[in-house]
Amino acid sequence: MHRSLRTFLELLSREKDLVTINAEVDPYLELAEIHRRVIEVGGPALLFKRVKGSRFPVVTNLFGTAKRIDLAFGRKPEEFIKQVVNVAESLLPPNRSELWKHRQLVRDFLKLGTRNVARAPVTEVVQKQVQFKELPVLTTWQEDGGPFITLPLVYTEHPTTKKHNLGIYRMQIYDANTAGLHWQIQKGGGFHYHAAEELNQNLAVTVFLGGPPALIISAIAPLPEDVPELILASLLAGEKLRMAKNPIGGAHRLVAEAEFALIGHAHPQVRQLEGPFGDHYGYYSLEHEYPVFHCEAIAHRRDAIYPATVVGKPRQEDFFIGDYLQMLLSPIFPLVMPGVRDLWSYGETGFHSLAAAVVRERYTREALTAGFRILGEGQLALTKFLILTDSAIDLHDFRAVLEHVLARVRWESDFFIFSNTSMDTLDYTSGRINQGSKAILMGLGEATRDLPREFQGELPMGIRRAEVFCAGCLVVEGSPYAEEKDQGARVASQEVFAEWPLVILHDDASVARSSPDFLWSTWTRFEPAADIYAAEMNVVKHHLSYQTPIVIDARKKPSLPDELIVRDDIKKLVDNRWREYFPE
């Protein structure tokens, strides 16, 4: 579709979906707040021509609407993947006539991959005297540990197998030529670094900024380990990815159409504090030690454009990207996980906090097997709460999904909590980094109960109000956690809630009125093993058997980092300058 970022911006301009801001803008907090306000109203991509302290313009909000994602990639990648899945199913067992029917697909496969070119715009300028301060790197939230590169395409190769990984891992600028590499658990670049450390070797690292839109999206895609992101980029772009010789003789070729290439390495056994950073869960991720990138040279176009994004409480730009990737890759799920018919992770929760799946139940407990398969698949292994049903249902409609499952779940046998598991690095609900617990909730077969739809009764002491989220799920507003830590257990014992299968204890019951608010404020604020209570729990054959109501304590806990809130002076600054940014 688009060979470079430039052709995509040209299309957005023709579509009147790109606005140029000529007023000088500060990369410290101001630019990010402009971006947030525009994306909140479904506004256009933004090209900031004059960024304070840098000669390079900045572009943001490239993929902040479904329309722009469609303009970037069209329908062909989705159709291609569906065709691949259909062919894979029809060719088992293989036969000559079926192969001949799909000969065009073979031709399309031959277009995938990379090819070398002699001329590369990214090498027009090569700087060996590295100065990161020349780049318009953004500070997006006031408590951030410093400026962060927020859209880096970090390329590494395994030191022995040479299989590659391309991922977006935020990079905190430390000084003129070093930056943090936020390699979380379950990330391919981190696996490569671990392998290099075992050999006591430097790991070559090349960071691309910009390039074909397909390259950016592929770096975000949750592909299984060792599945090459450059192949997906080639598929999305509709042609082989153009690569060029490294101008300083480094270990990696360069993406010819990138805007910038930061060429360097990471030393083994070297860590530095990184963070805090306002992250996509809607809270600050805290300071932790991560590997360090040492930049040896910067190659860039003569008129390079610096691409950036801003993350925060959903829905931000990464929400739309995540939804697109799920839609694109969803036909593959039944192929690699045969018991799974459909799967959806909820971007409103940060994706890893909550997922739901339609699975097969052809024999007793097959659904549970499918659940374990999901929790063992790549980045899906970081899912905190997994909901399963065997009925065909629109997983995008969470109210309908939860209501459907609550009418069917047998709490004594179909609810599982697993303690002492890994958890997403950015999820602090357990109070420990990378560690926590998971839950599986199954609602299978026919409905077993009628669900209450209206709350009637006297609220117990300490509960100020109650609102219904969906049939069977009641949200109650309790006391602050510091005043009554065990309120969740007390709520579970109250007879007035006995007919409600699920009760959510919140600081503000009004979140029940909005599905996005409910999803974010519930699933980003509890850990299954620590914050779920029941009227009664019994051990039956080493399984915890639950009696309703089940209570999830989703109040803010002391372990939770600060929520992301825009500083008042930045609000006022952007308010006052709004007509300078957008004079028409």
Image: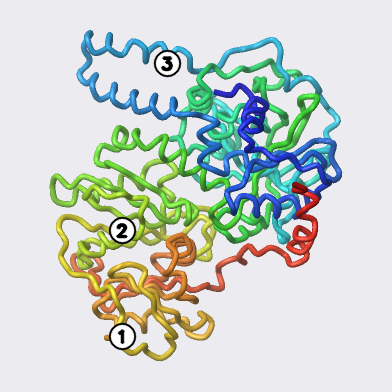
Image quarter hosting the N terminus: top right
- Tell me where residue 418 appears, x and y as whole percent: 35, 60
> What residue is shown with label 3?
109
- Tag 3, which secondary structure? helix
Task: Kindly report the distance in space between the C-alpha atoms of the residues bearing marks 3 and 1.
Answer: 61 Å
> What residue is shown with label 1?
494
Q: How many marks?
A: 3
Q: Residue at x 48, y 63 (%)?
A: 517
Q: Looking at the image, can residue 163 be seen?
A: no
Q: Nearer the viewer, residue 408 or 429?
A: 408
Q: Nearer the viewer, residue 486 or 444?
A: 444
172 versus 5 height, above or below = below
333 versus 397 height, above or below = above
> What residue is shown with label 2?
400
Q: Amino acid at mark 3?
A: Phe
Ranked by sequence position, the earlier of labels 3 and 2 is 3
Q: Looking at the image, can residue 27 be seen?
A: yes
Ranked by sequence position, the earlier of labels 1 and 2 is 2
